[in-house]
Image (spheres, helix red, strand yellow):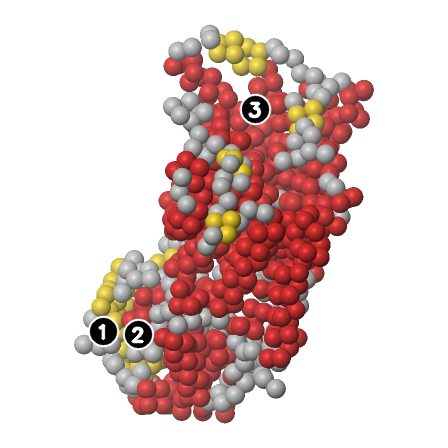
Amino acid sequence: MNLFDIFTHQLVNGIVLGSFYALVALGYTMVFGVVKLLNFAHGDLYMVGGFAGFLILSVLAPFLGAGWLGVAISMLFAMLAVGFLGVVIQRVAYAPMLAAPRLSILITALAVSLVLQNAVLAMTKGQYQPFGASFGFGGVNLGNLFISYNQMVLVGTAGVLMLALELFVTRTQYGRAMRAISVDKDMCRLMGINVNAVIAVTFFLGSALAAAAGTMAGAYYGSLWYFMGFLIGLKAFTAAVIGGIGSIPGAMLGGLILGLLESFGTQLPGVGSGWKDVFSFSVLILVLVFKPTGLLGKPEQERM
Amino acid sequence: MSLLDLKGVSLSFAGSKVLQDVDFNVPAGAVVSLIGPNGAGKTSLFNCITGFYKPQSGSIKVDGVETMRMKPHQVTRLGIARTFQNVRLFREMSVLENVMSGMHCRTRAGVVDAILRLPAQRREEAAIRDFSIECLRFVGIEDGWHRDAGTLPYGWQRRVEIARALATQPKLLLLDEPAAGLTAGEKQELIALIGRIRDERGVAVLLIEHDTGLVMRISERISVLDHGVMIAEGTVKEIQTNPRVIEAYLGVEEGEAELAG
Amino acid sequence: MAAPPQGATASAWGGLALLLDTRFKRSLAISVVLIAMVAAPFLFGPYATVILTNALLYVVLALGLNIVVGYAGLLDLGFAAFFAVGAYTVGITTLHFGLNFWLALPLAIVFAIIAGVIIGTPTLRLRSDYLAIVTLGFGEIVRISARNLRETGGASGLIGIDSPWILGWHIETPRDFYFVFCVLAILAVLASARLANSRLGRAWLYVRHDEDAAEAMGIDRVKVKLAAYIVGAIYGAIAGAFFAANLGAISPESFSFQQSVLILMAVILGGMGKIPGVVLGAFIVILAPELLRDVGDLRLLIFAVGLLLIMLFRPSGIWPAGGRK
């Protein structure tokens, strides 16, 4: 394989990876926008979404098959289920803590994450769970480059979801309210906007997107693990920060950039797959230290 | 040379101009008031002086030392202390511990000193305690030092905040609306306290205040800020009769009445 | 009758200060604890001795993290990194360079301080959410590096670490190490108490409560936070050094995120910020799995749910807060 082939191969890999990161990063960024909280449990909603998709698929497979249709329908149901789970978590765990010191709500989010992780750990005994989707292996050949249909469907689905979200945010009232709240929550309350409802919708959407990513990941990579949310959570957070936390286009851009960085980064001499995560974490730390507002974020000047 | 010297200070936030080319100074040992309609930029000016906001242009000098690039704690060490518009005490710590925070920048014990408890460290701790109690007594709080600061009545909390600022041994004390929410009696005590801060401790006082009566009674000099611009500066009499100032305060007749206190 | 302790000391000891309000009561309590500590291995046998040693190790680790989280209010999710630095420094220098343990120990402390400065300086000015994730990232970087590098023994770690000698006595049996950790735990408690009731301890609390107001009072918040981080690192490194000497073998899996979380649970479950609470939390985290043996995999879930319930209903932990009114 020559350099060009490696380049294009990693380009495709990067875009696929980036789609996952972008979907999960969107949840982080949206929630951060409206409640100024980094939902530590968000990565675990991705994991739960994957398991939910698996469970639903095993119920639907006899009727719809385990191919794209079955997985797609399962994914939609998983999105609904986990979306509601996200709202429940917000109401039960986060809403009461908003007045408490910052440290308390962070620890609460960590606790929620641990509950989700350990619940699934207990149920699966820590074993990898095969997803059970039956996808074909067909694809398209462009010279030396092979792009599978699965990859195209995956990226396409992610793109559709992101487009749907973008339309929602820019065209609907809820979407406008979301953006308004992220700028000045108290003013919104005074203007009669039902802030609590909008926050609930935000959590629903963010969690649903994470669940979509989780189901797709389960189908694409073939297996699920109780701990898979941990890493994706960190990577998605990195993506959200790169793009500028609080900015929805930023999350999409950041996801793509991180996916590409990781794919190309593993080709650097000395950086094998064992060091892949160290590479990503280093990127995170560098971005936070040198450009914490990311590429598209707005600088925060605190009023005293 | 003044104690505090601002020249050409301009500050904007996201496009809106908060302070425009402000010149301002406070002489050592003086009591100066900064007044102006709401939203004029007074607290922002305080925040620039104390280093929390960084103006886009201009110069701020304390005793001749340029402080524009300094972190807030460095400005405090130079001798500027402040209170806040909405009292910002450490509510879950005791009154005494709150005041002791002021002495941090004037003392030095570190990790090793703390763990070993050598005589020098114990002497320093005693000195911190004694001076903090002195500051509390100075503002009229004779006991109840071990209560959590958040449990004190509002007027007393304001006093603790002043004691805390005095504990930093400042040359200039910035008071942000110290009379807000005080009863008439408490306001009288505040006037007396400000006088004693200047006379007994030699500390200059700069206050932002809306109670114009209080301002007229206590100030040696008044500066008036309106929409980020310094529109007047002078003695009480001069300000009371300054037409620009009167206009800034709600139009001519009401403004006159307002300024007459 | 002596007056109850005032000021920051009282807050460090929590409700215990109110309970033990006379000099006599305090001396009695201390004597009881010391006697219990000395008698325990003889009363409870070798297996219990190992468990108790583990609990004492956690006391040291949790007190270290308590300074970072409980005093200074910095949510550090990668504290195991300092534990690792201590353990691996001792492991590598004694195994590969034949260094005496008592020389390796100060070296471990030095490296932990360096790590604290490297991690802390760029990140301590970040807001708390970001800090939590960045410290988590650093914890993972340390663990993955330990797993990948040849010098640290790769995924299988280091084995055959010698146990130390002190004044002619070879510390080698579990009971020997138990007493060593007793001493470490006591030193950790004393140091934490003295720090709490000092200029620096108060500064940590000021910064934790309202860092802008603290800054306005002339306190350099970055320097103060860094001090907390470094002191915590030192606790972690000392614990790690003796951990390596005790076990004789270390592997990267002891220094994972799960470990950091477990230490954090020890800090919070008993009563965040209060020394007796942290000690209690350490014992809870180590002893509960022994007592809840049948529950098996659900054990971690129970802890997690417990943590969530505590945060929602009693954020100051199980131990009463014992504030003054």
The answer for how far apart the CA atoms under marks 3 and 1 are is: 63 Å
Q: Amino acid at mark 3?
A: Val
Q: Compared to C271, does B142 lie above or below?
A: below
Q: Would you call the spot at circle 2 few (<14 residues within 10 Å), some (14-19), or many (20 or more)?
A: some
Using the rendered image, report if marks 2 and 3 lie on a common chain: no
The answer for how far apart the CA atoms under marks 1 and 2 are is: 9 Å
Asked which secondary structure carries label 2, the reply is loop
Q: Amino acid at mark 2?
A: Gly
Q: Which residue is mark 2?
A: B79
In the picture, the disc for residue A155 is 3
Q: Amino acid at mark 1?
A: Asp
Asked if the residues shown at circle 1 and circle 2 are in contact, with their CB atoms under 8 angstroms apart, the answer is yes
Asked which secondary structure carries label 3, the reply is helix
Asked which secondary structure carries label 1, the reply is loop
Using the rendered image, report if marks 3 and 1 lie on a common chain: no
| Front residue of this view, candidates B150 and A242 | B150
Q: Which residue is mark 1?
A: B63
| Front residue of this view, candidates B141 and A209 | B141
- Residue C288, percent from left and from top: 71, 51
Subunit ID for the residue under disc 1: B
Report which quarter residue C12 is drawn in. bottom right
Residue B197 visible to the viewer: yes
Kindly report which numbered mark, 3 or 1, lies closer to the viewer in this rendering.
1
